[in-house]
Amino acid sequence: MSSPRQMHLGCFILAAGHHIAGWRMPEAEAGSENLDLVVRVAQKAEQGKFDLVFLADAVNTRPDMHPSMVLRLEPLTLLAALSMVTKNIGLAATASTTYTEPYNLARYLGSIDHMSGGRCGWNIVTGAFADAAKNFGREKHPEHDERYAMATEFVACVKALWDSCEDGIWQLDKAAGRFIDAAKMHTPGFEGKYFSSKGPLNMSRMPQGYPVMIQAGASEAGRDVAGRIAEIVYAVHQDMGASKAFCDDLKRRAVSFGRSPDHIKIMPGVSAVIGGTEAEAKRKLEELGECADPKVALQVLAERLGHDLTGYDLDAPVPDLPPSGIMRGHAETLQALAKKDRLTLRQLRNFVAASMGHRLIVGTPEQVADGLQEWFEAGAADGFNIMPPWFPTAFDDFVDQVVPILQKRGLFRQEYTASTLRGHLGLPRPEWGG
Amino acid sequence: MSSPRQMHLGCFILAAGHHIAGWRMPEAEAGSENLDLVVRVAQKAEQGKFDLVFLADAVNTRPDMHPSMVLRLEPLTLLAALSMVTKNIGLAATASTTYTEPYNLARYLGSIDHMSGGRCGWNIVTGAFADAAKNFGREKHPEHDERYAMATEFVACVKALWDSCEDGIWQLDKAAGRFIDAAKMHTPGFEGKYFSSKGPLNMSRMPQGYPVMIQAGASEAGRDVAGRIAEIVYAVHQDMGASKAFCDDLKRRAVSFGRSPDHIKIMPGVSAVIGGTEAEAKRKLEELGECADPKVALQVLAERLGHDLTGYDLDAPVPDLPPSGIMRGHAETLQALAKKDRLTLRQLRNFVAASMGHRLIVGTPEQVADGLQEWFEAGAADGFNIMPPWFPTAFDDFVDQVVPILQKRGLFRQEYTASTLRGHLGLPRPEWGG
Ligand SMILES: Cc1cc2nc3c(=O)[nH]c(=O)nc-3n(C[C@H](O)[C@H](O)[C@H](O)COP(=O)(O)O)c2cc1C
Ligand SMILES: Cc1cc2nc3c(=O)[nH]c(=O)nc-3n(C[C@H](O)[C@H](O)[C@H](O)COP(=O)(O)O)c2cc1C
């Protein structure tokens, strides 16, 4: 029996795995610079009829960051490469509105959309790592809410650039000598407080009009931006009620900006540790925990909470800390979790080491499918951002064992019915000048 | 008989063709956004054992620019895509040192080098089009020599970033839990007048160490930069003596900076119009000329000379104009040509419409091969940047008809003997920290 509403699935490719010790599993092929691995994962996701794959990004590094982040291929060039070895799946990546230029980024994303035939998605981030500033010769990372103000203006600017040309500009009329229809090229002349770009952009309108807009803010300012512009929202929730409240809030905000609630898809992250039995899955998670580097784990937690944690007692309850200026929403969710479950700092550190704070489902393929179905049917999610603890086999198991169950239950597509990311998500192509 | 020294060949892909009317030829497949065409051209160049393909770029547009430049795919993402559908050929593109950030560009080029297994080349330009400034919210395009000062510092900055990690940083020792060798990661802390970037770059050292550095400046400031850092120099010469003098000058400059004259390869541009007979080739060129849009032709000449030309008498001799602040060397070469051959503005316009001021060889495949051999053996070139008047068939003819002659004469490789662009060019891989 097939349900009319189906969930959307994305694969969050963090090529050393999402668990900080994932790369140490016997079958793991680590290496966030491993092109061949990323290609195989994207092709596997496409075989599983996923809506999209997603590549995160940051413009800074240190040796004790999450192993997937220390060294990495640059995601825009990587997406461009993936466009040549996949056919249907959406291709999304993070790009910063704080550390790129609108004219340049408009071109990179536009090219990817052209080359992939309309499969590009853009995760709009303001930068979750304050260290980035010094890599761009800046004194300091702009303050949290100002970053969102910049992001809002940046998006308006690139949209104006993307609409430099009306649809149908190409003429290629050899006999008449008409290469393009020059009347269809316009000069947006965007002038803002943070960004200005006269244009026109040197590219025709892209197949999707604009790439699918993704956003992951959870703070007040972040939710506001998401409600205005996001078409996919990545979220971090361990609790179904909290996730449902988040979905309702985001859809309400979208409606208040005159948008349809169906055009904003909430996709919380899920890290699934899959075993033939629940006990086997639990053993895997334990094994991963034993392999985790405690120093890296504490650093990852420190980034999420927005505070240096050295010096705190690991076996005392998670301390109260002032609001984070970086990933504010993540920090709040984790603090709430720690309060509710009375976690020690060590326990919270270990949880974040496993799933970076996202929901963790540990069990058989049926149990994983049940866990997804429950949230989906409760209106706590429109789909899920799948964050495998390691690659490729933990993801292969998801595709080979969990996806067929979801398909059988009518919760997920059996075949692609569209060839663009907007098509997979049921999103309209924006009108020119929209 | 095989000669020990062999020429290098690059294909300059300007996908509507180099002749401004190339796209109107019956067999031309126009469209600088035509990914499929670019892929086929790159694969054809690889079949012809070319050293590299090259994609130019600009960060501005107007409807009456050269048709290959009005609308275009962004070249870095395009190179990334080409890395997946080619195996041996070098992949080079233009990127501006005036309108990108060192940390970002270091990553894009580094990723392309990683993904292609060491085939990336970078044409370092300061921006030949002053209109770019307004697309980046800047008051004005920096002045000619200052742009080169910025470029020099930019290159020093990205080299420092590319050397953030020593070779061999990856450990992936699962048993010991050693992901990388953290001692091999360094913080360059680059601080300059125009650009600063602390680093480290979040990428391991690339296969080639640095991408092959290409430069095309011809002015005093441009030659100075080329002598210091360029490994390929693109040049514009119609006269063999002038090209020989240019080669000698550039190699002398390289030596004065402590470099080997063999590590700077001078590649003047050549537009070959090939026919079964000389008469047929000449007919093709005439036909192209008749199809050229005079308004676009004058605009292209105006860009090359750095001055608005509306109002000048087309049938009077080319006027004396003050030095160009944009493409200074091109302007001088064209002015010299006009003086020497007593050209009218109309004649110069028509010449530039055909080859953008580069050498034009019109004849049979043997005549084209002769023309290349002559300059090569005279020391007026180390190789050639082939600029087909249209794509794909004008380039197919070059590969199918001219290359075999060059190979037979021992002037060009029969097979690849290396898999990196440095390998094809006989350039060393730079030492770490070099
Ligand atoms: C699934 C997911 C992926 C994210 N990817 C990135 C990323 O690639 N780069 C980045 O700087 N931040 C990333 N973030 C962080 C968000 O951009 C944002 O900083 C964070 O959600 C906190 O926003 P807030 O301060 O509005 O709560 C991601 C967040 C989530 C939930
Ligand atoms: C073959 C060739 C390719 C070039 N490609 C570009 C390009 O893609 N983008 C650009 O802005 N300038 C390009 N240029 C222009 C040069 O970067 C430079 O501006 C020009 O050669 C004049 O430099 P000069 O002022 O030092 O003489 C190219 C020049 C040549 C000869």
Image (spheres, coloured by chain):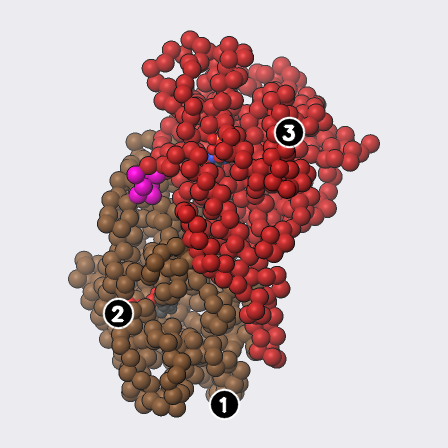
Chain colours: A red, B brown
Q: Which callout, 1 or 2, points to the residue nearer the camera?
A: 2
Disc 2 CB within 8 Å of nearest ligand 2 atom: yes
Report whether mark 3 lies on the same chain as mark 2.
no
| Residue B21 covered by magenta stretch | no
User: How far apart are the alpha carbons under marks 3 and 2?
Assistant: 63 Å
> Which residue occupies the foreground of this view, B271 or A324?
A324
Disc 1 CB within 8 Å of nearest ligand 2 atom: no
Mark 2 lies on residue: B219
Say which element carries label 1. helix
Mark 1 lies on residue: B279
Q: Which residue sits at x=50%, y=27%?
A: A329
Residue A295, compared with residue B338, is above or below; it is above
Q: Whole-percent x and y of residue A237?
A: 57, 24
Q: Is mark 1 in CB contact (under 8 Å) with mark 2?
A: no
User: How far apart are the alpha carbons under marks 1 and 2?
Assistant: 37 Å
How busy is the neighbourhood of tag 2: few (under 14 within 10 Å), some, or many (20 plus)? some
How busy is the neighbourhood of tag 1: few (under 14 within 10 Å), some, or many (20 plus)? few
How busy is the neighbourhood of tag 3: few (under 14 within 10 Å), some, or many (20 plus)? some
- The chain under label 3 reads A
> Which residue occupies the foreground of this view, B323 or B204?
B323
Q: Amino acid at mark 1?
A: Ala
> Which residue occupies the foreground of this view, A130 or A151?
A151
Mark 3 lies on residue: A248
Residue range in magenta is: A133-139
